[in-house]
């Protein structure tokens, strides 16, 4: 997992049930309502990295995930001015009750950058809580700036059973080479299931667990990255996969699955799939054994037996 994605994954651990780490925010009713959500206020725009929603109270948490230690002052001030309705409309959040929506902003960062982030927020003149994500702990700093809905579940911090899980191992900003192993693994799995084809969108949904939560622009970028990864995989295994581009009558490209390893050779099926998953290259066949070639181990065993026979005692007990 890329280092810049550690804070976001730490946050998602808190709203994802079924993980090894305790989902304290999910337990109180929060869920992820959107990722990379663009919101505009007074001609200023921010992209909310993760938007959390509490349906019972119509409360939203606008989360800004920082990969480094710097705070963009204009961005922080825009978050301060952002009304709850802007986030609701941007993420198309469904409000089921007449309770007016409320919102707050949370900055999320790695624990080593927490103090710099807090200083940057003070310099910008805003008062936001900071979620500090470490390898073994997640702490809410400046909890006095947070609502009770956010502060109460995180009071005393959260001790992690293990490092933050890779719920999002890559995103729309990741290099293509980072995405390739995930796309290849999914394509090999589909190949083994003898699927005939899948659209680029379908493949992106399969490899990116939270694809449906991303805003439109981020989804476009993810599809483009997945398509680029497919090109590299097809280049390395043209006998197994093909990439058909979109046409005037077909709005998007698709991946076709060609011959499986068992189609080429039913022997060594498991090893062949493992080789495809690792590099996309078929496994080399083992050379045939010459029946006239002597077996080294047999020769050594024979030598040991001859040596034993040479020291056997005679009838009088002499060697």
Image (cartoon, rainbow, N blue to C red):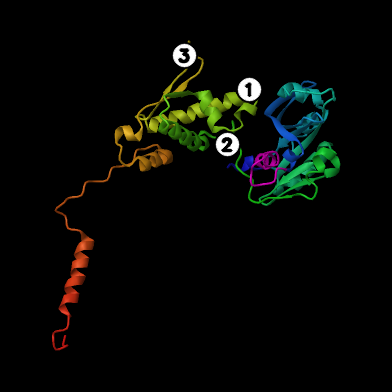
Q: Nearer the viewer, residue 169 or 107?
A: 169
The outermost residue toward the top is 249
Say left or right for 212 vs 156: left
Residue 49 visible within the image: no
Give the class, few, some or many, for how many residues have Cα within 10 Å of label 2's Cα (few <14, many ≥20): many
| Left or right: 8, with 85 as reference point | left
Please state the total of marks drawn on the protein image: 3
Residue 111 rendering spot, x and y as whole percentages: 71, 48
Q: Earlier in the sequence, mark 3 or mark 1?
A: 1
Magenta stretch, residue numbers = 7-23
Q: Which mark is residue 8?
A: none
Helix, strand or loop status at disc 1: helix
Quarter of the image containing the N terminus?
Answer: top right
The crowd level at tag 1 (other Cα within 10 Å; few <14, some 14-19, many 20+) is few
Q: Quadrant of residue 24?
A: top right
Are the two marked residues, 3 and 1, in contact with CB atoms closer than 8 angstroms?
no
Q: Residues within 10 Å of mark 3 (few under 14, many from 20)?
A: few
User: Disc 1 marks which residue?
Assistant: 216
Q: Position of residue 286 (x, y in %)?
A: 27, 45
Tell me the residue that label 2 is attached to. Answer: 170
Q: CA distance from mark 3 to mark 1?
A: 21 Å
Occupied quadrant, residue 173: top right
């Amino acid at each position: 997992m890329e280092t810049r994605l550690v804070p976001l994954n730490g946050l998602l651990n808190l709203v994802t049930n079924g993980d090894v780490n305790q989902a304290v925010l999910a337990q109180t009713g929060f869920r992820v309502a959107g990722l990379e959500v663009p919101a505009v206020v007074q001609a200023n725009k921010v992209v909310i990295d993760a938007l959390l929603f509490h349906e019972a109270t119509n409360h939203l948490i606008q989360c800004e995930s920082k990969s480094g230690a710097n705070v963009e002052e204009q961005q922080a001030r825009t978050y301060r001015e952002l009304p709850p309705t802007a986030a609701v409309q941007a993420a198309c959040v469904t409000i089921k009750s007449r309770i007016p929506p409320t919102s707050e902003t949370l900055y999320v960062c790695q624990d080593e950058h927490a103090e710099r982030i807090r200083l940057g927020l003070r310099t910008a003149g805003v008062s936001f809580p900071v979620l500090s994500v470490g390898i073994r702990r997640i702490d809410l700093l400046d909890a006095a700036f947070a609502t009770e809905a956010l502060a109460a579940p995180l009071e005393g911090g959260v001790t992690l059973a293990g490092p933050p899980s890779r719920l999002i191992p890559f995103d729309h900003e990741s290099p293509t080479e980072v995405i390739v192993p995930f796309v290849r693994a999914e394509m090999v799995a589909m190949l083994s299931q003898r699927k005939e084809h899948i659209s680029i969108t379908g493949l992106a949904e399969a490899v990116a667990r939270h694809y449906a939560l991303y805003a439109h622009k981020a989804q476009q970028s993810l599809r483009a990255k997945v398509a680029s990864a497919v090109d590299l995989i097809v280049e390395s295994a043209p006998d197994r996969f093909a990439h058909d581009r979109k046409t005037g009558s077909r709005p998007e490209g698709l991946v076709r699955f060609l011959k499986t390893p068992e189609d080429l050779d039913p022997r060594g099926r498991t090893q062949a799939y493992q080789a495809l998953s690792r590099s996309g290259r078929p496994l080399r066949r083992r050379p045939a054994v010459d029946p006239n070639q002597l077996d080294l181990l047999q020769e050594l065993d024979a030598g040991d037996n001859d040596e034993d026979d040479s020291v056997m005692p005679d009838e009088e007990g002499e060697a």
